[in-house]
Image: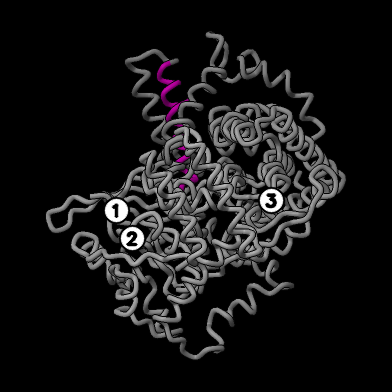
Amino acid sequence: MLIALAGNPNTGKSTIFNALTGAHQHIGNWPGVTVEKKEGHVEFEGESIKIVDLPGTYSLTSYSLEELIARNFIIEEMPDVVIDVVDATNLERNLYLFTELLELTGKIVIALNMFDEARRKYKINVKRMREILGLPVIPTVAIKGHGIKELLQESLHGNFAPKGMEYPDDVERRIQKLLKVLEKYKVKNPRWHAIKLIENDGEVIKKIQSIGARDAIHLAEHLRHEIEDIYGDDIETLFASFRYSFAHGLFHEVAEPINVGGVTLTDMIDHVVAHKIFGIPIFLVIMYLAFNFVFEVAAPFQDAIDLIFNGKDIAGGGHINGLIDISYNWMASFMPNWLASFINHGMLRGLGAVLTFTPIIMLLFLILSVLEDSGYLARVAFLMDRLMRKIGLEGRGIISIMLGFGCNVPAIMSTRALRNERERKLSIALNPLIPCGARIQVFAFITSIFFVSHKAVVLWSLLLLSMVVVALVGFVYSRTIFKGRAEPFVMELPPYRLPTIKGLGVHMWEKSEGFLRKAGTIIIGAAGIIWLFAALPWGVEYGSQASYIGQIANFLAPLGHAFGLTPEALISLFFGFFAKEVVIDTFTVLFGTKSAMLASMTALQAYSFLVFLLFYTPCVATLATVYQETRSWKFVLFVVLEGFLLAIFFSFLVYQVGTLLGVGG
């Protein structure tokens, strides 16, 4: 049996998925795209059930990748049941997606999630809702596990007799007329395809063209113009209003508001944290406190991992060997020195460096999960929307910018949701200036070595600089290269909720797992390649000027003098072009120990390096995505030059001003 989970963002859909599948779940990407795909399995009443968590979306149009994935899965895979996870505290708004799901399938189970919170706002007559819709309706409180078993029971044994929404007679007659034409071509779900053809849905038009049904396309165009003439409005607005009217009517049939106009706890909190003047300063303070917490808590774990791998110097001149030295001495007794060095000083040392700052990464993701699950990050997007609108970027563009803090690749792909080509290109141009998770990992690594007493301040300053530069560059672009005004955008602000320990743990692990997977593949592999550059040609001293990496360093050395960038830093930037995490391995392989790193660079040089890393060219995968989304090598070159020019300017400014002031020597 196949069940699909659908719903708006922030409805608790992921919590329900986790409750249904437990540990029996797999996370990957949808075929051909980088949008996350979650699948899980559960055995229930002797039935093996596969559950697929569809991307959260507000509608099923063809404007965004998430919308296309969700609706295409339902059309092509034809799940036995779709569980529509509805935020019961925002029932009317959530019912809009239900109206579109109802056009795709009649096998829907409605999960009225957060039902306990909803009862403070209005009385919901669940029985009446079941009667009106002819579908199972289950109140759930996902974070407490309430209603989860009932969802599975209704999915297996529920009574599905849907009473689908009907459009006004003038519209319904035309839908039926087109439906009969499509039936001749044996199209799956001809009614839905007829509606979408009349709505002028580009993806559906391409699909119908591919089967040669040109008569259906011409008829749909004719019917569309007829409907627009009758109602005096564009077709998209008309169909949206029909669906909203159905959702509005259903809501008032089944829900009776309580304490209308009362001030909620969410309202009181938002009056402070979402304030138009104090909101952003409060956000910056919260992020500083978060970084400080992360570094302070992670420090003892980092020290312990470092001790295990690298050992420790003892007062008086002694040294406790770590795993790397012990393993090397053992392997050197029965294998060539170069092989023992490759395994230990290359691969194992790279792994040790990665694991040493893994506690920082996991705690960072934990804090971000707290902010996201509590509803605060939605407020941050709202606050940034006010700022970004002044640089000509609408709300959906803000979302893609925020996604960039995770990874620039899916963030750039998410710009497909933007309807305005100008804003889409502006968002793509700005996104590489946002420090992705990989760059933040490098920041954490460098700051934990060179800025022990000021780690949080340094990391916080880099993120602040990034935000300021994005705002300034966007302001200039929107008045020169990408002229225009932002379109209006309505942003959802979910109520504040107390995150659950289980939910935080799942989210933290999901995000950290990706990093650890990279640590075992790309990063460790890169460490081996860098070791080869430092060891070859055979016979030279490891990492010396005669080695390949030393020769590269000598060639690059003059380039970094004005920016305080050492040859090792320049080499790491070179390898970092392929994947930013590789910067860590370059430092680790070249220096080996923290003390060697500290001896090679001053704090000012380290900060200048971090600023350069913040802006210079994004990784190969990001540039490939830029080309994929723009089909323009000129745009790719523009992104590369943009990053380098900003990196050169700010790194030069930091180092030269710092040198004049005698800072960080």
The image position of residue 107, as x and y in percent, is 30, 58
Residue 654 lies left or right of residue 175; in this view the side is right
Please give the name of the residue rendered at 65% of the width and 18% of the height, measured from the top-left corner: 550
Q: Earlier in the sequence, mark 2 or mark 1?
A: 1
For marks 2 and 3, give the one nearer the viewer.
2
Is residue 97 or residue 272 the one in the foreground?
A: 97
Q: Earlier in the sequence, mark 3 or mark 1?
A: 1
Q: Secondary structure at mark 3?
A: helix
Circles 3 and 1: CB atoms closer than 8 Å: no
Amino acid residing under circle 2: Ile
Q: Quick check: is 597 in the magenta stretch?
A: no
Residue ID for mark 3: 462
The image position of residue 271, as x and y in percent, is 64, 79
Which quadrant of the figure has residue 502? bottom left
Please give the name of the residue rendered at 49% of the width and 91% of the height, measured from the top-left corner: 259
* Residue 5 showing in the rendered view: yes
Alpha carbon distance from label 3 to label 1: 44 Å
Which quadrant of the figure has residue 309? top left
Alpha carbon distance from label 2 to label 3: 43 Å
